[in-house]
Amino acid sequence: MNKIVLASHGDLAQGMRQTAEMIIGTSENIYALSAFRDEDEPIGVQMERLLEKIGYKDVYLLTDIFGGSVNNDLLTIQQAHPEVTLIAGMNLPLVISVATQFQQIDEDMLGHLIEESQQGMINCKQLLKQQIQIGGDDL
């Protein structure tokens, strides 16, 4: 089974896990780690400890923002453990998609899941303007 570790600044990762579980149910394969709170260890130390416990195979590390300190700190883990996959820019559709895949995710499938999650970002104001302009009632 795929394992997802959400890592973020503050409590975003915990909130993302909690929200995903509201939709897909409690999941034993989603973990959440926080960085840069007063009581936290460095994110790299937290991640190494967790990975030693859950293993490195079929693990997807999802971070909040590319180039952010959390993502940058986890790049060293990606380099040390190439079997782990690090993805920056997590969003709820991506978390749910990865968490509900029961087979191993190959590179093509992962690319598809990332693309799908990106397409879920919609400017609703612009969408409504377009619908009004064409006279449609349905979105």
Image (tube, rainbow, N blue to C red):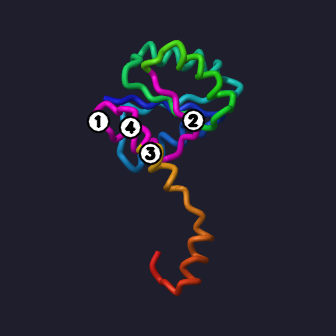
Q: Are marks 3 and 4 in contact (CB under 8 Å)?
A: no
Callout 1, which amino acid? Phe
Q: Is residue 102 magenta?
A: yes
Mark whose residue sits in front, 1 or 2 = 2
Check disc 4 and report the residue beneath it.
108
Check disc 1 and report the residue beneath it.
102
Which badge, 1 or 2, is on the more N-terminal residue?
2
User: Callout 4: 10 Å neighbours few (<14), some, many (20+)?
Assistant: few
Check disc 3 and report the residue beneath it.
20
Residue nearest the viewer, comparing 27 with 139? 139
114, above or below 74, in the image: below
Check disc 2 and report the residue beneath it.
88
Q: In 3D space, how far apart are the residues under numbered discs 3 and 4 (Cα atoms)? A: 23 Å
Mark whose residue sits in front, 2 or 4 = 4
Is disc 2 placed on a helix, strand or loop? Answer: strand
**Extreme-bottom residue of the structure:** 135
Q: Are marks 2 and 4 in contact (CB under 8 Å)?
A: no
Q: In 3D space, how far apart are the residues under numbered discs 1 and 2 (Cα atoms)? A: 22 Å
